[in-house]
Image (cartoon, helix red, strand yellow):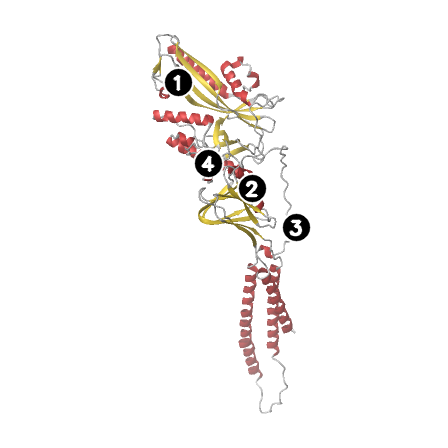
Amino acid sequence: MRFVWAVLAFVLAAAMIGAGIAQRTVFQGPKTQTESVSLSQDTPYVLVDGSVLNSLPGAQTLRAEGSGTIFAAYGRTADVKAWLSDTDYVQVGVGENGALTTSEVQPTATPAPTSGATDTTTDAGTTDAAAAATRDPIGSDLWLDEFQQDDQLVAPLQLPSDMSVLIAGDGTSPAPADISVSWPIGNATPWAGPLIVGGALLMAVGVFLYILGIRHVRRSKGPRRKGLPLPVTEPIDLATAEADKGVISSGSSRRSLGRGRRTLLVPVVAVSALLATGCSADAWPTVGGTASPTPSASVIVPEGQQSPAVTEAQAERILARVADTVAEADAASDQALAATRLDGAMLAERTTNYALRSSIADYAALPAVQAKPLRIVLPVAYDAWPRTVMTVVDDQADKVSSVMMLTQADPWSAFKLTYMANLEASTELPELAAPYVGAPQVPPGSDFLTLAPDKVAAAYADILNNGDASTYLSLFDADSDSFRTGVAADRQKRLDEFNQTAADTGSLTFESSAGSQPPLALATLESGAIVAVNLNETDTVKPTNADAVIKLTNNPTVKALVGAEQSATGFTTTYSDQLFFYVPGQGSTEKIRLLGASSHILDAKVIP
């Protein structure tokens, strides 16, 4: 009976293992679904729309084949289309039957000016259009990520429907013609694992039953016959017979049986382990319910607010590019290179510094732009241009934090650093929106603040000029403003030094005024705004005696800028101040607080 059960176990085990293996092989089907398209147009750019990537659920794998280097980048669909709006391109979409379709899109915007384009031909914009058609997409600040491979590009993606992919070569040659998108197919076989392992266990049971059957047969030695009576003259030596019997049973039979058992058990265990390890996670049923997600804090986005200009990762990459470019420009005193990543007050101060360093051997460079660790990112919530991003970076080495404003003029331009200042040591920033929400940009003439952004610079300049007599003094917090205290002390010190030798022959006066750079303001959560402004502080020294002259013996900085050692009319020296303020909203009892400041020499001139 044991043999019958053993054979039955073998048959069932073979059926179960065969069914499990069949589910993982011949019956499993394809693991991915692929849609492909071949382009006939010779355009340098191809846009794979987000509707294509999300036409099937799951992660996407993008493939593009062509000759040479293949470039691909993804970003928000609106941003990618804005970058392509001045040139023609091919858009890949989804047809009614689910197949990929292509359509050629014509330019809808005025071609963007490109650096290095010197031809001013305006015949229907043909020159600018040609430049746009050959613009290199590599390194644009709009992309959330980008890829480059030779001849064949494979990019694993998991993008939402509002993001698209740009595919190109070098911006000049035609884009890759063969493009495909693949999605995984849910073909899990949850019973394959249990069938294979269950069959292996049942086979082990069958082997065990088979061994028991053999052992039973060996012990019974088959049917016995009653022997003939022995002659009396032939006695039997029972001791010898028992000894011989013991030798036979414990020697050859038992040793043979032990070897056979081990020989059968080893392959069964090995096969079972091999089958069990060959089953992946999708070959097993899901045990228990799925884990409930932990609720996160709710983020309330104001109705009608647009998307943030950049993500945190995007801001980190942009700021790193700015820091690297500025460091390279500082090392070479290259104003043209600096202009690719600096603008406004930052570029004006750097230009002056480069001129001074070329004339004065030991003149110090301006502080470097710090890129990390990035503590705060506050992008403007705005879909169009220009765009603004505020960042705060902690310099752990110097124990100084820098607050910066970066702007992007249009889709084809890089983000440029416009304002940068050191935060006050005891500065407490107001509550800001999360980076993935962004903040509205406050118009320069906004009436929703205690003081409009375009009036902050002039009001603060009036305080620096008139002190306690200023009509704006009550609007600003004096207790936390160490910059104002420092300016007043520095002016008094220089005036005292000047009067020691030139009180009877000359005069030194100071005046602050709003700078030429426009203010930038981003809203805070308390209905206030962080406002960055530019001030100019001008020192004027001139003779009061007709026979006197102003000499620059001890002032190599001004001497290098004006190119003269003395003047009978005098000199003016201008310093540029970059200031960050928190301006509360209308109705608030708070005062305007200075958050950060920096000051560097801007210009010097001979009084005409």
- Residue type, mark 4 in image: Thr
Which numbered tag is attached to residue 289?
Answer: 3
Give the x, y percent position of residue 596: 50, 25
From the viewer's perspective, is residue 594 above or below residue 328? above
Q: Quadrant of the C terminus?
A: top left
Which numbered tag is attached to residue 126?
Answer: 4
From the viewer's perspective, is residue 55 above or below residue 389? below
For this orientation, the residue located farthest to the front is 123
Q: What residue do we see at 53% from left, 33% from top? A: 377
Name which of mark 1 and mark 4 comes first in the sequence: 4
Other-residue count near label 2 (Cα within 10 Å), few / some / many at <14 / 14–19 / ≥20: many
Q: Which residue is mark 2?
A: 163
- Residue type, mark 1 in image: Lys
Q: CA distance from mark 2 to mark 1?
A: 52 Å
Judging depth in this view, the residue of 409 and 108 nearest the camera is 108
Name the image quarter holding residue 294. Answer: top right
Q: CA distance from mark 1 to mark 4?
A: 44 Å
Q: Which residue is mark 1?
A: 605
Give the x, y percent position of residue 454: 54, 22
Q: CA distance from mark 3 to mark 2?
A: 32 Å
Q: CA distance from mark 2 to mark 4?
A: 31 Å
Which is more foreground, mark 1 or mark 3? 1
Residues at discs 2 and 4 in contact (Cβ within 8 Å): no
Name which of mark 2 and mark 1 comes first in the sequence: 2
From the viewer's perspective, is residue 192 above or below residue 597? below
Other-residue count near label 3 (Cα within 10 Å), few / some / many at <14 / 14–19 / ≥20: few
Name which of mark 2 and mark 4 comes first in the sequence: 4
Name which of mark 3 and mark 2 comes first in the sequence: 2
